[in-house]
Amino acid sequence: MNLTEFIRQGLDEDIKTGDISSMACIDEKSRSRAKLLVKEDGVLAGVELAKMIFHQVDPLMKMDIHIQDGTYVSYGDIAFEIEGSTRDLLKTERLVLNAMQRMSGIASLSRRFVHEVEDLPVKILDTRKTTPLNRDIEKWAVRIGGCTNYRDGLYDWFMIKDNHIKAAGTITKAVQAVNHYKMKHQLQDIGITLEIKNLVECEEALQVGNITRIMCDNFELPLLKEAVDMINGRFETEASGGVSLETVRKIALCGVNFISVGALTHSAGSLDLSLKIQ
């Protein structure tokens, strides 16, 4: 879903036939100025999306941005000020806040993961564990927080997981089938990640080859280090499965190139923000 359509649907969900409270008690000619107030420490995200929301309702709204996306903010900071029709400000308030609070929560958690491994040669990846239809803005927030997007969906990266292997019969058959599909459909530029569960599967993966990355799923740390040593740079390496702020550095020290973290999106909270008319 593109952002214009996301905004349209988000506004329609809330407004439907009209903001009856505002229409009842606020003159249609009334104009106001509002401030976006930060009520919790964290990483701000969604300012640019808020600008798009306001301007989709009224392109003439005047927005003064004081703090940019990706900035660490503290309680009491004013992220931006917005001026326009009072009714329009109230119509957009909830979508702006819902989106920004969610994005800022994700960006804040992403930044914490980055800090845990910032001195190590590893990238923290997000996953497809996102809120349905909100993937674009949640992955945008991951980037703002300093982590890296993995695949956007099932269509832009091959990932051979345990269920694919089970259905295909073996790792070798699954990898060969994917490479045949790549050639047939001229998808040579799209990478292949192969998920493995143990060192026996690692050995088979090395024998079959023709992949981009080997993902070690839920490996204990000693086995993960052994798998990285076995792979020895022949393919990219990735660790996944239950990664937390407490474990991510230990995993990174095993030498993997990537760590995928579903928690960036599925376990992030919201940063407390409010939009107040002055």
Image (cartoon, grey):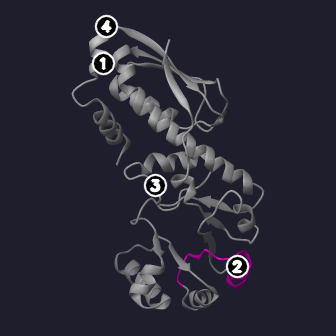
Disc 2 marks a residue whose amino acid type is Val
The residue at 70%/79% (across/down) is 228
Residue 255 versus residue 277: which sits nearer the camera? 277
The residue at 74%/79% (across/down) is 222
Q: Is residue 59 visible?
A: no
The residue at 34%/76% (across/down) is 185
Disc 4 marks a residue whose amino acid type is Lys
Disc 3 from disc 2: Cα separation: 29 Å
Packing grade of label 3 (10 A; few <14, some 14-19, many >=20) is some
Disc 1 from disc 2: Cα separation: 61 Å
- Quick check: marks 1 and 2 in contact, CB under 8 Å? no
Q: Which residue has dot 1 on it? A: 21
Disc 4 from disc 1: Cα separation: 15 Å
Residue 208 image offset from top left, x and y in percent: 54, 90
Q: Which residue has dot 3 on it? A: 130
Disc 3 marks a residue whose amino acid type is Thr
Packing grade of label 1 (10 A; few <14, some 14-19, many >=20) is few
Disc 1 from disc 3: Cα separation: 33 Å
Identify the disc placed on residue 29: 4
Identify the disc placed on residue 228: 2
N-terminal of the pair, mark 4 or mark 1, is: 1
Dot 3 lies on which element? loop
Residue stretch in magenta? 210-233
Residue 266 versus residue 251: which sits nearer the camera? 266
